Amino acid sequence: MKSDAMNTEAMLQEAERILRLNDKGHYTVPTHGLYPFQWNWDSCLTALGQFRIDPDRAWVEVETLMAHQWPDGMVPHIVFHEKDDGYFPGPEVWQTGRPTPTSGITQPPVLGMVLEQLLLRDAQSPRAESRCRALMFAAVRWHDWFYRCRDPQGTGVVALLHPWESGRDNSCDWDDALAQVPTEGIAPYQRRDTTHVDASQRPTAFEYDRYVALLECFRALKWDNTRLHDASPFQVVDPGFNAILIHSELALARLATQLGEPDLAQRLSARAARSIAAMDTLWHAELGQYACWNRRTGQRVQSASVGGLLPLLVLPAKHPHVVDLSKKLNAWLDQAPFGVCSMDPNDARFDGKRYWRGPSWLIINFLLIVGLRQAGQSALTQRLIDASFKCIEASGCSEYYHPMTGEACGGGTFTWTAAMVIEFLTMDNAPVLEVT
């Protein structure tokens, strides 16, 4: 599926240039300056693009990330490989005590789906299966951690304890829960993000105070994941995050079957089926999509964000909500031709430039495309690919885009955006994996 408006080869060359530009040898930074370390789901999705340049380098990217998995199974959202004072909060704030400093929270677990794709694409390599096997078991330990530490009551869906874990840091979904986080007594701090990007495109001071307050709360508990869930003043069940977890769980189950681990495959498949059923509790009929649940208050979150569309990743093609979500996507694209808004464009809180309160992100477009392809929604798939290329044509490989104008927002020469360009240009060759 290729863009007619630009030369395909030129687009690929530019995307590859950006991946090389941000390559530190065994990991990539999302972009220099704003994000100078290794981020969890950035690296995993970047590996898909890296495979076109160098298959071995793609495996190394995820191997580097997983080398810093915690003993309890958690995979941190940042690995601080090198010292860099240009980012806050750095390792001296997290104080997690890891041999190589890391943060103390996690991020969306896209690893399972990425591993499946890497093995499919690298099937002829004599080392691919052994590398994938080791990473598969590490990913399973991570998933086990989620269900043990973020779903202690066994509901089938896991909670986020910090907005940063969602990957959608300042989404409107977190507003009510975040407002309940106490900030008295937090240490003075100096942000660095607004020295790299205009403050109008970043989270507010109100939000950042609460991000820091949660970090300090968890740090006081010495990052003990057996205690953090119940102690956290922020506990939100996000349908988007859970859809990504379940999608990767199904991918790991298929890998386990392929790699001769039938008992593991059965366990993962059963857990995924239970979680898919539990997702029904997050359907919001009034909004016509899935919505978050505030586990702390026991209340549904009245917020229509793109996270509530991501369950397309795990819905069978004939599931009735596939039609509902497809209608919602088409309606949003009617108003925003440069990709899917991260927030309902009709919501009063919508802001087309402020990070996750409106802008379009190519990695979200990609995840939705994966779900739409599984559901056989070919016309909408193509519409979303075309919208993604419009962003690139208008503003290059930026971090995110104004969904109505295509204006570049956030950081420039952005790694995972470049990786997604490669994915979209080569997607015709990728197999479609059905959800049953």
Image (cartoon, helix red, strand yellow):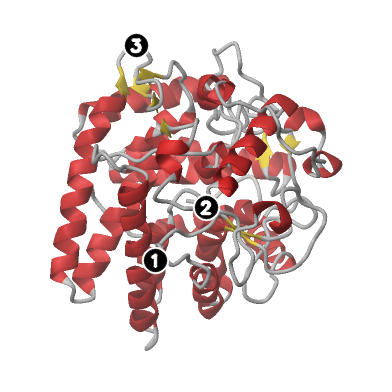
Disc 2 marks which amino acid?
A: Trp
Quick one: label 1, few (<14), some, or many (20+) residues within 10 Å? many
The residue at the far right in this view is 195
306 left or right of 210? left
Residue position for label 3: 286
Using the image as rendered, state which of residue 392 and residue 419 is in the foreground.
Answer: 419
What's the residue at 52%, 19% (across, down)?
Answer: 176
Measured as percent of width and height from the top left, residue 277 is found at 19, 36
Along the polypeptide, which appears first: circle 1 or circle 3? 1
Amino acid carrying label 3: it is Glu
Residue drawn at x 27%, y 67% as measured from the top left: 255
**Residue linked to disc 2:** 223
In the rendered view, would you say 375 is above or below 320? below
The residue indicated by pointer 1 is 115
Task: Give the image quarter of residue 116.
Answer: bottom left
Q: Nearer the viewer, mark 1 or mark 2?
A: 2
